[in-house]
Structures are given as structure tokens and as C-alpha cells.
Image (cartoon, rainbow, N blue to C red):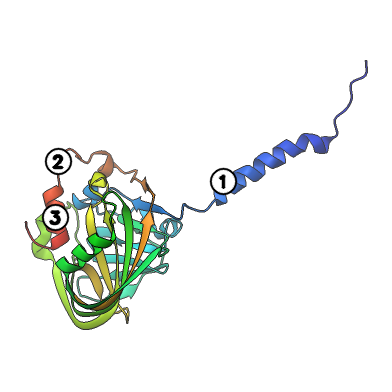
């Protein structure tokens, strides 16, 4: 019995479909509701300040977020896909995406709810107001606040060299900046308690003035007239440093009090 010959193009069809599927997976966009972290928060707080994660890769995971430059040289903010660095001198500049960083948390921000508030709000009052809006205590929220502020107090650390100390041991090295009657943006997140350690739970904001000349980690504020945009995130992913320092880092130590001190800029 003579066997039928199968045309070559029919044999190639499954291969072509397979290649197309692989290409589609490679170009598949990141989850729009995903919180992405480059690095592990308690590791960074504990002294992992070496650059390892490329800015170019970070941009694939978000256009909005906060982070830190290598060797702890100030603070980072990502807004509308642009990265800004505030150094310990107070100078804020746009960062080229050709380098690397030790830690960042980002997402693709899309406001799902918008609120406006007129009238004075202290930092404590603002957080209480946000709590009244963000009713899921276990929800992951990205928060963008834009408007007028009677006062914004920020900080940035100066660059450090090895051997690195934990952040909480270097609070006396912080540089503080006060900005009065300023307009600008707050970029940040509210992270639930169950994510503590991998992330910094609670509220965490960085500031950028409207003229892009001032910024830093938020320490205190007095808001005057603001618009609050909320994006609810439904998942989180993380890339970890593949370095000897990370591999040998002691994660058994509880750093909750250290994180509180670092967030507030003073020992608790």
C-alpha cells in the first residue's frame, strides 16, 4: 500500500503556530493592575544599596512609583513614565534610564476613582481621610495626589559606601527640606499589613514639585486644595537580586520598628 506524502507546508504549520505563541508570550504586556517590586523592602532597609536592577526593565513594569538610587544617593519618583531623583542637596533632576537601582516599587497607574478635597489637611488628617476612602483593609492601592500645599517637608539621604549600615542607623545623616506654598504631586501606595517585610506596609509617599525642581521622601505636610486619584491593584510580583549580598542577608531579624523610624524620619 502506497503511503500518502504530506506536503511540507502542512508539516510546518504546527511549528509556525508554536513560534507565534512563543513570540506572543514574550511581548505580552504586564498586568495593568499589578504592583511590581524590584528588591525586597526589609533587605533594602537593612543595607542592600548596591545597584542591580536596570531602569529599562523597570519601565516594562510601570510608569508610576517610588524607589531609591544606588548607594542611597537620595530618593526616586516615577511619574508619567519619567524618573526623577532628589539628592541630599535638595536638587531634583530627571534621570536617564540607562543605569540601575537597588530598590523600587511601581505599577501602571490608571485612576479608578477621583476625589477632590478643599481645606487644610495635616498628614495625619490626610491619612485618616484616605482610610475612609480605601475601605478594603487588605487592598493594595496606588495613590496620586496633586494640588496645593501650604507645607511639604521631605528628606533625602546622602550617598554612602560599603560597609553599609541599616537605614535606621543613619537617621542622623538625613537632609530635610521644607517647601512652603508649593504645588506638586505626591506619588505613593498604601500596602496591607500581610505584605510587610516584602514591602513597606501602610502609606509611603514621595513628593515632586510642579516645576520638577524639588522632591524627596514625604515627612510632613499641610495640604490646602488637592485632587486624589486611586488605582486599586489586584496582584503583586517581585524580582530579587541575584547577588552574594542578598544571598547572605539575614532576613530573620524583625525590622518593623526600623521601618517606622525610617518612614517618619526619626526614632520611634
State the image coordinates of residue 152 (x, y, percent, origin top left): 19, 75
Q: What element carries label 2?
A: loop
Residue 25 — which label? 1
Numbered badge on residue 104: none
Residue 262 appears anywhere in the view: yes
Counting other residues with Cα less than 10 Å from the Cα at mark 2, is it few (<14), some (14-19), or many (20 or more)? Answer: few
Q: Tell which residue pokes out farthest to the top in this image.
A: 1
Where in the figure is residue 105, as x and y percent of width and height? Answer: 33, 56
Q: Marks 3 and 2, how far apart in space?
A: 15 Å
Q: Earlier in the sequence, mark 1 or mark 2?
A: 1
Q: Which of 251 and 248 is in front in this view?
A: 251
Whether residue 165 is visible to the viewer of this picture, yes or no, is no
Q: Find residue 210 and report its image quarter.
A: bottom left
As measured in the structure, the alpha-carbon distance from the residue carrying label 1 to the one carrying label 2 is 39 Å
Whether pointer 3 and pointer 1 mark residues with C-beta atoms closer than 8 Å, the reply is no
Q: Residue at x 70, y 37 (%)?
A: 15
Task: Assess disc 3: are there few (<14), some (14-19) or many (≥20) residues with their C-alpha within 10 Å of its C-alpha.
Answer: some
Q: Mark 2 points at which residue?
A: 253
Asked if residue 13 lies left or right of residue 257, the reply is right
Query: In the drawing, what numbered circle is on residue 260?
Result: 3
Sequence-wise, the earlier of marks 3 and 1 is: 1
Counting every numbered tag in the picture gives 3
Callout 1 crowding tier (Cα within 10 Å): few <14, some 14–19, many ≥20: few
Q: In what element is the residue under mark 1?
A: helix
In the figure, is residue 88 to the left or right of 69? Answer: left
Q: Distance between the residues labelled 3 and 1?
A: 40 Å
Amino acid at each position: 500500500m502506497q503511503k500518502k506524502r504530506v506536503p511540507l507546508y502542512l508539516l510546518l504549520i504546527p511549528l509556525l503556530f508554536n513560534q507565534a505563541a512563543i513570540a506572543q508570550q514574550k511581548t505580552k504586556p504586564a498586568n495593568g493592575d499589578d504592583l511590581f517590586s524590584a528588591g525586597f523592602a526589609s533587605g533594602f532597609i537593612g543595607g542592600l544599596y548596591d545597584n542591580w536592577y536596570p531602569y529599562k526593565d523597570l519601565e516594562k513594569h510601570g510608569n508610576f512609583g517610588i524607589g531609591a538610587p544606588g548607594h542611597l544617593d537620595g530618593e526616586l519618583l516615577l511619574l508619567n513614565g519619567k524618573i526623577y531623583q532628589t539628592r541630599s542637596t535638595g536638587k531634583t533632576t530627571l534621570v536617564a534610564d540607562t543605569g540601575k537601582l537597588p530598590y523600587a516599587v511601581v505599577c501602571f497607574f490608571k485612576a479608578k476613582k477621583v476625589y477632590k478635597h478643599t481645606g487644610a489637611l495635616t498628614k495625619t488628617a490626610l491619612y485618616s481621610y484616605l482610610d475612609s476612602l480605601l475601605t478594603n483593609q487588605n487592598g493594595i492601592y496606588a495613590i496620586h495626589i496633586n494640588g496645593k500645599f501650604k507645607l511639604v517637608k521631605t528628606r533625602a539621604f546622602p550617598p554612602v559606601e560599603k560597609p553599609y549600615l541599616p537605614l535606621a542607623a543613619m537617621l542622623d545623616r538625613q537632609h530635610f527640606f521644607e517647601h512652603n506654598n508649593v504645588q506638586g504631586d505626591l506619588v505613593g501606595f498604601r500596602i496591607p499589613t500581610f505584605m510587610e517585610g516584602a514591602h513597606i506596609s501602610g502609606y509611603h509617599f514621595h513628593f515632586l514639585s510642579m516645576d520638577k525642581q524639588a522632591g524627596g521622601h514625604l515627612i510632613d505636610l499641610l495640604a490646602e486644595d488637592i485632587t486624589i486619584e486611586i488605582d486599586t491593584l489586584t496582584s503583586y510580583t517581585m524580582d530579587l537580586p541575584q547577588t552574594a549580598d542578598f544571598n547572605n542577608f539575614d532576613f530573620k531579624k524583625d525590622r518593623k520598628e526600623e521601618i517606622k523610624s525610617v518612614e517618619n524620619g526619626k526614632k520611634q
